Image (cartoon, rainbow, N blue to C red):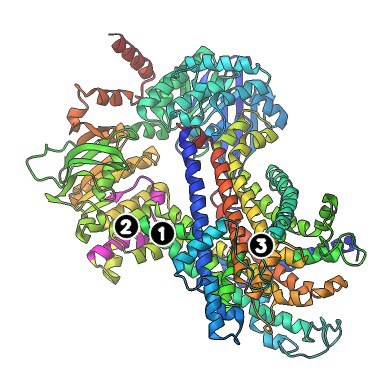
Amino acid sequence: MPDTDDILLSMKDLCIEGRTDEEWLDIVKGVDLELRKGEVLGLIGESGAGKSTIGLAAMGFARDGCRISGGEITFDGIDMRKAGEATKRRLRGRRIAYVAQSAAASFNPAHKLIDQYSEGPVKHGVMSRDEAESDATDLYRRMQLPDPDSIGFRFPHQVSGGQLQRAMTAMAMACRPDLIIFDEPTTALDVTTQIEVLAAIRDIVEQFDTAALYITHDLAVVAQMADRIKVLLKGEEVEESDTRSMLANPTQDYTKSLWAVRTHARLEQPPVGEGRPVLSIRNVTAGYGSVDVLKDVSFDIHPRRTVAVVGESGSGKSTTARVITGLLPPRRGEVLFNGEALPPDFRRRSRDQLRQAQMIYQMADTALNPKLKIRELVGRPAQMYLGLRGKALEERIRELLSLIEMDPDDYIDRLPSELSGGQKQRIGIARALAAEPQFIICDEVTSALDQLVAEGILKLLDRLQGEFDLAFMFITHDLATVKAIADEVVVMKDGVVVEKGPKSEMFQPPHDPYTELLLSSVPEMDPDWLTGLLKARATAADG
Amino acid sequence: MSHIVNMILKRIALGILTLFVVSLIIFLATELLPGNFAQEILGQSATPETVAALRRQLGLDQPMHVRYAIWLTDVLRGDFGESLANGMAVSELIGRRLGNTLYLALYAAAIAVPLSLALGILAALLRNSFFDRFANASALTSISFPEFFVAYILIFLLAGAGGAFPSMANFRGDPSFGEFLYRAFLPALTLTLVVTAHMMRMTRAAIINLLASPYIEMAHLKGMNPMRVIVKHALPNALAPIINVIALNLAYLITGVVVVEVVFVYPGLGQLMVDSVAARDMPVVQGVALVFAAAYVFLNLAADVLATLSNPRLVHGR
Amino acid sequence: MGLFTGLFWLAIAVVLGLAAGWVFRMAVAAASPRPIARELRTAPLTASFGMLIILIYVLLAVFAPLVAPFPETEVVGTEYQPWDNVHLLGTDNLGRDMLSRLIYAARNTVGIAFVTTALAFILGVMTGLLAASVGGWVDQVLSRAVDVLMAIPALIFALLLLTIVGTSIVNMILVIALIDSTRVFRLARAVAMNIVVMDYVEAARLRGEGLLRLNLREILPNAMAPLVAEFGLRFCFVFLMISALSFLGLGIQPPTADWGSMVKDNATLISFGDITPLLPAGAIALLTVCVNFVVDWQLHRASGLKE
C-alpha cells in the first residue's frame, strides 16, 4: 500500500456532463484516479474518451457547456469541487499548471513570450518581474531552446511550433508547480520535432520532480513518458497498471486491440516488371507565386500497386497530389496517364481523364457536401460518368454501399451529419469507386480517425484494390500506415524526393540520412526507446 | 518595419484612388441627368439663344473629359461652382454648414463611443446575465427605430409643453460653447441613442468571439481573474474589430445627421443636401455628396490603418 | 404623462407582448408537423412575438381594403380631427382617415421594401456567388467595383441618384436595390468563399461539374442559413431607408399612403402633445424590431450549433 500522505491528486467516482442541444449527456462516467507526488500518470484513449475533460477537472475547471456533476476531486487535501473561485485561482498556474495541445493557439498573439511567462509568477506573488525574466531565460536554456536570452522577447508568431510547445512547458514550470497537466502536447507536431519536445518535457519533469498527468492517444508516446498508464474508453476506465506490465501483458480486450492495430500488414506483392505504369510523374517542378514547392519530382505508380508518399508537413506531398489532379499546373515536367500526357489544368481534361483518377480526402467532414444525401453523394459520379439513370442508378448505389460494408436500406437516405467519422470516410471511398477509376489518391485518409477505425479503412482499401485492380497513391506522414499498406515508398523532404523504392528495401539499412532520421523518430512501444535513441544520437554526434 | 510602412502607404494610395473614382461617379451622375441642363435652369420659356449662351457660360459645350478635368481642378482648389437656386458659391454654402455638422457628430461621438465600449465590455463580462439580456434586447430595439421616431419621441418627452430642451436648434447670435451644448442636446442625444446600441452589440460580439480562443482558456488556467482576462488578454486582440466598429458608426453618424438635421431644423450639411435634392440644385448636391464621401473614405482609411497597427503579426514581421 | 407612468405602460406592453408570443408559439407548434414544432419550441419569446407581429402585418397588408374603414386617399373629414368614434385615430393634415391610411401604408411601405430587398438579393447573391466560384479577374473586377460604390454613404448615394433620375416609386426601388445589392454581394461572396475552399467543392470541380450545378447544388444550399438571416437584416435596412427617404419627402410620393411621409405631414401635432404622428413611426419601429428578433434567434441558432 502506498503511503496516503504521498497522494497529491485523487479523484473518486468523477462524473462530468456535456450539453448538446438542451440535453445533458455523460462525458465522464465515474472515474477514479490517484496520483502521487512526483509521479507521471499517462491517460490514454481515443477521441471521446473524456481524457482532456478529466485533465481540466483536476484544476477544478470545466469548459463552457460542460459541468462536473458528481464525485470528489481532492488536490493536496483541498476539495476542488467545494473550493471557491478565488481559492482555485490561487492554485491554477501556481500549484497546478496546464500545457495545451496547440501552443500556437494557446499563446496570446498580442504579447511577447516572456511577458506571458512572467504573468503567472508575478501575479501569484512568487517572484518579482526581474526575477521572473532571468528565471525564464534559465528555463528556456534547460528546454534547449535556441537563443534562450532573446527568444522570450519574440511574439508567438515569430517562433516555430516545436519551440512554442517547449516555451509553453517552460511557462507551466514558471511557478514550480506540484502538478502539470500535459494535454496532447506533441500531437500537432511532426515526428522529428516531437522527439525534441518529448525529451525536453521528460527532462524538466524529472529535474523538478513534478507530478504530471500526461494525456495522449498515442501508446508509444505515453510509454516513454509515464510511470503508470490508465486506459479510458467512452468516459470509463478500462484498466490501469504500471507502464512496463501494461505493455507486456494487457489484460482487457480493448487494450489488446489497441496493441493489435499496428500489426496489419499487406501481403508482399511480386516485384513490378517492365509493364507500363498507370501514372508517371516526370521531372515536375511546381509552386505558388515565386516559390517552388516541388523540385524535379519523378516517380511511377503501377497497376494494382500502392505507392506511399511519405514526408513531414511542408515536404510537398499534398502539392504533388494537386499537380496530379490538375489543380496546380506544374511549371516544368508532366504527368503521364497510361503513357499519355495529361493536360496540366484539370479544366482542359476530358471527362474520361477526370473519371480515371479519383481522390479520397483526409477530412471526411469537409469532403462530403453536408446538404446532400448519401444517394446523391455516391450516385452523382455514376450518373455523370456512366450515364446511369433511374433503376440502374439505384441498383448501382446499393451495390456500392454493400461494397463498403454499409447497409443500403439503412443508409441510402441519410445525410453525412448522421454518420460517424469512419462511415463518412467509407462514403468518400464509395464516391471514388462510383467513377470506376483505375487510380485513386488517398490523402492522409486515416490520420483523422481513431486507430481501430483507421485499421478498418486500411483493410477495406486493401480488399477493394484486389477486387478492382486499383492503383493507389497513399499520402501520409505516419510510417506505421506505410508499413501496413505500401508496396513502394517515396520519401519527400522540402519538395524533393529523397529516396524511393520497394517497401522491403526502405525499411532495411542503409538509408538516406533523412529517411534514417524519420524512421528512427517514430516512437516504439518500448519504454526505453527514447532513452536509447537519445543516447545513440549523442554518441553518433560525438563520433 | 518597412513592410508595414509599405502596407500603410498602399492603403493610403488606395484611399486616394477610391476618392478619385468616387468623384468621377459623382461627376458622371450629373451627365446622366435627363434633359437639357441649361434648359432646366432657365425654364421652358427660354429662347434657344439664351440656352446656348448659358451652355457656353457653364462650359457645357466642351467634351466630357475636358469638363471633368476642369471640374476636378476647381474642386481641388475648393471651388465647387455656384448654386443654381440662389447663385451663391457652393463652397461658401458648404463651409458655413460643415462646421455645424461636424460639431454635432463630434458631440454625439463623444458621448456614444466611451459609453458603448464600456457597456459592450460589461455585457461581455456578464454574458448571459440579466444585464446582458436586457442590454441586448434594448440595443436590438433601438437599432430598429427609424431616427425620426427616436427624435420625435425625445421631442415629445423632453421638449414641447414644459420640456427642458428646445426642439429646434436655433443658432442665431453665435451661441457660447455651453449654450451650443444645450441647444444641440436633443439632436446629439438622438444620434447617440441610434449608434450606441449598434456599437455596444458589436463590441460585445467582438470580445465574446475571442472568449472561445485557447489562449483565453490558458489565461484562466494560469489563475488570472476574469477582469484581467478580458482587459489584458481579450481586449488587445479585439482592438481591430472594435476600431472598425467605431469607424463604421462614425461613418453612420454622417448619414444619420441628414434625417436628424431635418427633424430639428439644424443648419447643417444634411439639411442643405435635402433642400438641394428637392430643388434639383445639382452643383450643391455634387459638392455635399463629395464632402460626405470624402469623410466616409477617410474614416474607413483611418480605421484600416489603426487596425493594421494594432496587429502584432503585421507590426512585428516574422 | 410622467416618465414613470410611461415606463409602467411600457412594461405592461412588454409583458403582454411576450405573453402573446408564448400563446402564439404554443398554438403554431401544436398545429405544425413534429420537426418544425420541435424547432419552434426552442424559439425565445421575443422571436415568437416577432413572428406573431410579422404575421399580423402581412395579413393587414394583404387584406387592407377589407380591414380599412375608409378609402386610402379620399378626404373624409376636416383637417386634424381628434380621435373619435368615426375616425378612431382622427384625420390627417388633409382630412383623410388616419387609421385607414395606416393600414394601407402597411401594404405600400412593406410591399415596396420587400420587392426592393428581393431585387437587391437576387442581384447581390448572383454576383457574390459568381465572384467566389469563378475567382480570378471576375472576382477582382466585381469586388473593386463594389468597394468604390460602398465608399459613398448609402443615403447620400441614394439622394444623389434620385436627384438625377427623379423621385418615383420605380426609380426609388431600383436605386435602393442597386445600392443595397453591394452589401449583399459582400456577404454572399464572403460566405461562398468559405464554402468554395471546402474539399467537397474541390471534388465537384475535379468531377467536371459545370458552374451552374456547382453553385446551385454545392455552394448555395450550404450558404442558405446565413443568407436567410441576412435577408431579414437587409429588409430592415431597406425598410428604414425607404422610410427615411419618404420622411424627407423624396421617397414614396403623395397621395400614396406611406408611414414615413405620414410622420412628416403630421409632425406639427407632436409639439401640441398629440401622439398621433408617432403611430406610423411606431409601426415602422415595431416591424423592424420584430424582424430583428426573429433574425437574432436564427443567427443564434446557426452559431449555437457550432459552439
The amino acid type found where label 1 is placed reads Val
Using the image as rendered, state which of residue B75 and residue A73 is in the foreground. B75
Query: Could you tell which of marks 2 and 3 lies nearer the N-terminus?
Result: 2
Quick check: marks 3 and 1 in contact, CB under 8 Å? no
Query: Could you tell which of marks 3 and 1 lies nearer the N-terminus?
Result: 1
**Are the residues under marks 2 and 3 on the same chain?**
yes
**Are the residues under marks 2 and 1 on the same chain?**
yes
Magenta-highlighted residues: A359-386
**Which numbered dot is residue C293?**
3
Q: Residue furthest top?
A: A543
The amino acid type found where label 3 is placed reads Phe
The amino acid type found where label 2 is placed reads Arg
**Which numbered dot is residue C205?**
2
Question: Disc 1 sits on a residue from what chain?
Answer: C
Label 3 SS = helix
- Per the image, is A452 magenta? no
Residue A497 drawn above or below residue C108: above
Label 2 SS = helix
Question: Disc 3 sits on a residue from what chain?
Answer: C
Give how far apart the Cα atoms at labels 2 and 3 are.
39 Å
Give the number of the mark in front: 3 or 1. 1
Q: Residue at x 49, y 59 (%)?
A: B21
Percent of width and height locating residue B109: 71, 50
Residue B224 drawn above or below residue A365: above
Give how far apart the Cα atoms at labels 3 and 1 are.
36 Å
Percent of width and height locating residue B173: 84, 59
Percent of width and height locating residue B94: 67, 61
**Which numbered dot is residue C141?**
1
Using the image as rendered, state which of residue C176 and residue C238 is in the foreground. C176
Query: Could you tell which of marks 2 and 1 lies nearer the N-terminus?
Result: 1
Residue C183 drawn above or below residue A462: below
